Amino acid sequence: MSLRSRVAPFADRVLPPAATLAMLVALWCVFVYVPNEQTMGPVQRIFYFHVNCWWAAYLGFFVAAAASGAYLWRGRPEHDWLAQAGVEVGVLFCTMGLVTGPIWARPIWGTWWTWDPRLTMAVILWTIFSVYLVLRSAGREDPEITRYAAVLAVVGILDIPLIMISVRLWRGMHPSVISAPANKGGLEDPRMVTALLVSLVAFALLFVWLLWLRYEGLRLRSEVQVLEDRLGELA
Amino acid sequence: MNAAWRILHKDLVLELRTREALSGLVVLVMLILLTFAFAMDPEGAASAAPAVQWVTFIFAGLMAIQRAFLVERENGAWYGLLLCPIDRSAIFVAKMASNVIVLGIAQLVLLGLLAVLLGVPVHAAPLPILLVNFLGLIGFSALATLFAAISVRLRAREMMLPLLVLPLLVPLVICAVQASRIVMNGGTIANAAAWIRVLATFDVIFSVAGWMIFEQLVHE
């Protein structure tokens, strides 16, 4: 029995209710349970979701790169499905991070966007992996496209340390107009830590569920393709 | 290595006899530079010279770099190459080398134009400027050659190559522009060492990665 068929019943039955429940609890925590942050006010509550978006985005990209490497090495379609699912979910969370960030930054920093190293890094990552999705749809009928996409994901991950170093150096040369507030990570109330941890669990479950859904979708699509080809041969 | 040299030799002879890539590329470089000069006022463009130089180089280079693979599409030459009993990575080495030569010549022309048209003091510190340009050239050629091998086989190839390469080139653009700014304003290589180090790392990583991954792209 393959790993997939052993995981499937569990994933289909447990993940949807677990992720839904955890997300509802996380919403309650964020909107009701935690107190207002003293200096930033209610807008700080976006932090609990914003931070988790980034963890999920990075996780998705690394899953995609690892699966792509495995696909180039072994050539098994499962790795390709996992890679594409990872990029799709990663880009989704990356987009949510890029949207929630400015909503917080506008009232707190006074600007929607600033070329802070972390923000710059985020937007470059978003472009690299969005292009991955464009590439896949541009070459949909090309049987080699899976290998091209895998190359892009692997090269994209190789590029990340270089982007990080050069972006740091680049912004380090200039006086930064707005530096990240030092207390951003300092959650003074223990209830804030609880809310963050609950959101983390909710996002982890949501991440795994979405990844699973996309993986299954891609697997089914390729199975349908095989069946259609066989029908074509019969006709 | 011998195989790579043969392919490179063939490409260079082809280029010498037709001058297709180089003549178009040199005119393109000039036109992009002129467009910048008109858009920014020539006086303003002089202070923005490092940025103008690298944006010009990258956009002109993206137009030219697919040629190395496009020429092989005629008369099924590509399948001939693949049928050769040689290491596939030799094809990458040869194509990257021919791109380096063609783009390198265009880059020298670009530096000359910058000196003449925008008054950039290229002659004041030729060696540091050439070093920075060479490192940028190698990194760009390695990455763009690898992805040109992908994009030539897609229908939307003119669109896909810049989409694939530009986000990955960000570290190169940042470091090449900053290093050029320092050496063009009379700085030494030591002043620009931090940028040059990242550039050199970029070159090594993507030359090796291209050389190793290329085989996966021509798998049939």
Image (cartoon, coloured by chain):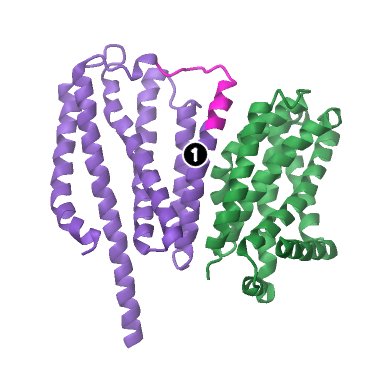
Q: Nearer the viewer, residue A155 or A187?
A: A155
Which chain, by letter, is green? B
**Colour in which chain A is shown?**
purple
Number of numbered markers: 1
Q: Nearer the viewer, residue B15 or A140?
A: B15
Three-letter amino acid code of the residue under disc 1: Ile
Residue B176 in which image quadrant: top right
> Chain letter of disc 1?
A
Is residue B66 one of those drawn in magenta? Answer: no
Q: Quadrant of the C terminus of chain A?
A: bottom left
* A14 is higher (above) or lower (below) than B33: below
Q: Is residue B146 left or right of residue A229?
A: right
Magenta region, residue range: A165-181
* A158 is higher (above) or lower (below) than A103: below
Residue B2 screen position, x and y as percent: 74, 63
Q: Is residue A12 left or right of residue A156?
A: left
Residue appearing at x 57%, y 55% in the figure? B212
Residue appearing at x 33%, y 74% in the figure? A226
Residue B49 in which image quadrant: top right
Residue appearing at x 56%, y 62% in the figure? B215
Residue appearing at x 51%, y 27% in the figure? A115
For mark 1, does the 10 Å Cα neighbourhood hold few (<14), some (14 to 19), or many (20 or more) residues?
A: some
Q: Is residue A206 left or right of residue A61?
A: left
Residue B15 screen position, x and y as percent: 80, 62
Q: Which residue is mark 1?
A: A160
